[in-house]
Image: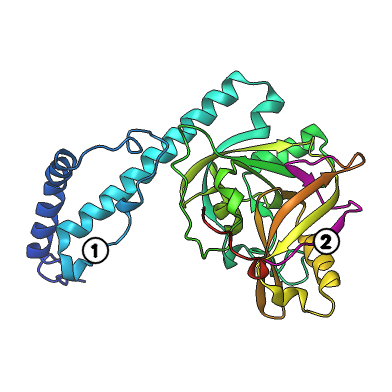
Amino acid sequence: RRQPTATMMPNLFPPSLAAVLLLAIASIPSALSSTATSTPTSSSASSPFHYDPTSQYPTPSLFRSGVLPFLTQKWNHAQSVALLEQAVEDHNAEYVATSSPLDAICYRRCIVLPLDERFDPPMGVFSHGHVDTGDKMSLNRNFWDAIAKSSAEVPWLFEVSRVNGVTSPRVILPTNEHHHPSSANLSRAVGGALDFRSPNNYAFLPRWMFSALGLRPRDVVDIRLVTKTPPGSAVRLRPHSSAFVNIGNHQAVLETELKHYSALTLGSTIPFDYRGERYYFDVVDLRSSPRGERVPMAKVQDCDIAAEFVRARDQMKPKKKK
């Protein structure tokens, strides 16, 4: 039986295409160096924890822009992500090496991305359909180990905080966005756990938390297991739309939807869904139990908390400018 020879093999990779690809790859370093010399370095780019979103968007078309711009953009994106991941990994490794065994697993510096429908639990699970209308996050496995070793009580709460000099500058939201005006100064938020299957050094947060903390995808934050959040006794919510208050059983709807939040953060804006409509509420007042003190964060799960509404935002008169 004849053995296949080089002349009998199909020409799957033409030499001309291979030569073009080799030339394009060889020219990438020079293209990158020319870009670096022509573009001034910003203060945010000087931090290893700052991700440059322009390295990913817009992605050039291979057929419209050519091979070199396409490969250069892909190279820039992969390099930016790799450097960011390495900086976060180095920080966490140093923290683990210099901390006690329990502290080492109760804290991580994480790159954050927004949750989407791929994280939605299967039907029958309590959080099904509430990925965006709850406070649950997808976290690293080490936080599950921290819960087990610290004997933390339910609800398991985690504080997400911006880090000065590490987290990139706040995203300035337009005035018509659904967010609390005071969230411009919010640096911490608290929430529960959806699961513990996110990759190392990554965490996935609900979108309202991104807005509350002024984050963008691939920002870097600190996440820590917290056990001293006080139980809540009362909360006052401001609906963005008076249409929710006009629902006949709106108080029952509130109590039902609030069960998907393990805790609340003063100054944040949380969403509820009801009959296909999404409603937004500003957390304008939050009181702890049993003394009724005003607190920045409070547990609402497994708490006897009184919830009431204040005047809807669309019914408030605009303040006159002096």
Which secondary structure type mostly characterizes the magenta part of the structure?
A: loop
- Horizontal side, residue 153 vs residue 144: left or right: right
The residue carrying pointer 2 sits among few (fewer than 14), some (14 to 19) or many (20 or more) residues within 10 Å by Cα, namely few
- Identify the image quadrant of the N terminus: bottom left
Return the residue at label 1.
60
Q: Is residue 299 magenta?
A: yes
Residue range (magenta): 293-312
The residue carrying pointer 1 sits among few (fewer than 14), some (14 to 19) or many (20 or more) residues within 10 Å by Cα, namely some
What amino acid type is highlighted by mark number 2?
A: Glu
Alpha-carbon distance for marks 2 and 1? 51 Å
- Residue 308 badge: 2
> Which residue occupies the foreground of this view, 164 or 172?
172
Q: Is residue 1 magenta?
A: no
What amino acid type is highlighted by mark number 1?
A: Pro
How did the renderer colour the structure?
A: rainbow
Whether residue 62 is visible to the viewer of this picture, yes or no, is yes
Residue occupying the point 32% across, 50% down: 77
